[in-house]
Amino acid sequence: MRPELRLSLQFADARHRARLPRHRVARWIRAALAAPAEIAVRVVGEDEGRALNRDYRHKDHATNVLTFDYAREPVVVADLVLCAPVVEREAAAQGKAVEAHYAHLLVHGALHAQGWDHARAPEARRMEAREREILLALGLPDPYAPAPSGRAKPGTRARSRTEYPRPARSAA
């Protein structure tokens, strides 16, 4: 039995709302969880994605997924922010379905929220192997496999990190 998940799904950029029904997003995240979790997923546009990446990672460009993890025990508490235009561009460049790319990035972010990282090569190999295992169990393709043409896919490794200042939570 999978851990309990309390999910908030928000769309500041609604272009992929129909591709991301709540039950599907919950299934993808739940597959990556080892503990109960409260996770908010926010799908944003380029401007908000860039501002968050600039403010919290000091990188002045939008990125595919950002993980803001607040607690890991006894319940994982995190916000996952996905930038719809970046996800769409990457999926096209990598020759994969947008839904499959979202699934990968949600699994990736959920793993970050639980302490997984890819800052060093050994960690990256372990995290990528876990992502593959989860996605294959979900019936989804290996996100790190070469593109169907046989060429390596550009930008295959997600670039999110958990090592940035945590935004303050309001008391309300």
Image: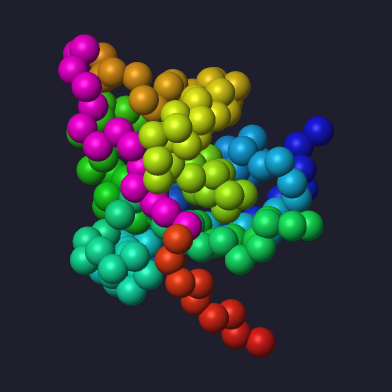
Asked whether residue 126 is in view, the answer is yes
* Along the line of sight, the residue nearer the viewer: 77 or 6: 77
The answer to whether residue 123 is above or below residue 52 is above
Magenta stretch secondary structure, dominant: loop
**Numbered-mark total:** 0
The answer to whether residue 148 is above or below residue 101 is above
Q: Is residue 91 left or right of residue 76?
A: left
Q: Quadrant of residue 91?
A: top left
Q: Residue at x 55, y 29 (%)?
A: 130
Q: Is residue 157 magenta?
A: yes
Q: Position of residue 57 (x, y in %)?
A: 34, 65
Q: Residue at x 56, y 61 (%)?
A: 69
Q: Which residues are magenta?
A: 149-162
Quadrant where the C terminus is found in the figure: bottom right
The answer to whether residue 83 is above or below residue 124 is below
Q: Position of residue 143 (x, y in %)?
A: 39, 27
Quadrant where the N terminus is found in the figure: top right
Q: Position of residue 35 (x, y in %)?
A: 74, 46
Q: Quadrant of residue 94?
A: top left
Figure coloring: rainbow
Q: Is residue 19 left or right of residue 171?
A: left
Q: Residue at x 78, y 57 (%)?
A: 74
Q: Quadrant of residue 122?
A: top left
Q: Residue at x 33, y 37 (%)?
A: 157
Asked whether residue 99 is in view, the answer is no
* Along the line of sight, the residue nearer the viewer: 114 or 49: 114
Q: Is residue 76 magenta?
A: no
